[in-house]
Image (spheres, grey):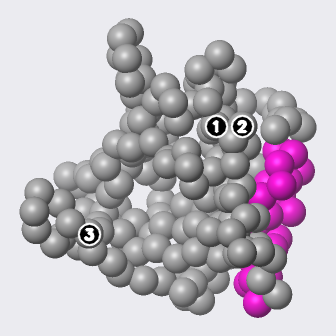
Amino acid sequence: MQALLFEQGMQRIVEDNTGPITYYPDIITPALATAWFNILLDQGDWHESSRMMYERLVGVPRLHCHYDIANPALPSVLRDALAVVQQHVNAPFNSIGLNCYRDEHDSVAPHNDKLHELVPHQPIVILSLGATRAMVIQRKKPPRLKIELELEAGSLLLMGWNAQLHYDHGIPKLRQPVRPRISVAFRVRPERAGKAW
């Protein structure tokens, strides 16, 4: 993995020895971020799901969908987004996962991505569209560094594979109303039977 550009305003949140985690604001214009958000909100293959938690079935508090980059039916807006991301991060992305946080009640609990679902030493890159939401990043072991990072529309967050070993990240619920946000996550998944996860 190699970051190709270092724009003005870039914030290095975590250094390479436990990361990296790097934030790039404004990699696309506000107008383009709005256009992509509206297309994905309207045309995304959104799903609700549930999971077992504390011995009961609970709804996942957000919508989600997934696309294999090799699929000829990949929406053109995601092809365009991939091209922009690859101008900034040189990685063989093969999977795009989207989450839609519909309002202040939607969230994702602190977690790290499952390493067995990632190709070792390849990054995760998140493009944010729609409303600004805070991501909480916290180190797993002392000193328990905790950062609240405002993910603005048109921004890119790069998390190195190594960061999943050392940090949890999540999007907390809010008390005040907020418009929808879509996160577009680019990953390198292991190949299974000729397809990425």
On whether residue 85 falls in the magenta region, the answer is yes
Q: Are marks 3 and 2 in contact (CB under 8 Å)?
A: no
Label 1, label 3: how far apart the Cα atoms are: 26 Å
Circle 3 packing at 10 Å, graded few (<14), some (14-19), many (20+), is few
Where is residue 33 shown, x and y percent of the image?
67, 65
What numbered label is drawn on residue 51? Answer: 3
Mark 1 crowd level (few <14, some 14–19, many ≥20, 10 Å Cα): many
Q: Quadrant of the N terminus?
A: top right
Q: What residue span does the magenta drawing correspond to? A: 73-93
The residue to which callout 1 is attached is 161
Disc 3 residue type? Arg
Indicate whether 50 appears above or below 150.
below
Do residues under tags 1 and 2 come within 8 Å of each other at their CB atoms? yes
Q: Quadrant of residue 6?
A: top right
Q: Do residues under tags 1 and 3 come within 8 Å of each other at their CB atoms?
A: no
**Can residue 153 be seen?**
no
Q: Residue at x 43, y 50 (%)?
A: 133
Please report the residue visible at 46 percent of the width from the left and 30 percent of the height from the top.
Answer: 167
Mark with earlier residue (1, 2): 2
| Image-based side of 83 in relation to 155, left or right | right
Which badge, 1 or 3, comes first in the chain's sequence?
Answer: 3
Say what secondary structure mark 3 lies in. strand
In front: 34, or 98?
A: 98
Element marked by disc 1? loop
Q: Marks 1/2: CA distance?
A: 5 Å
39 is higher (above) or lower (below) than 154: below
Q: Tag on residue 121? A: 2
Quadrant housing the C terminus: bottom right
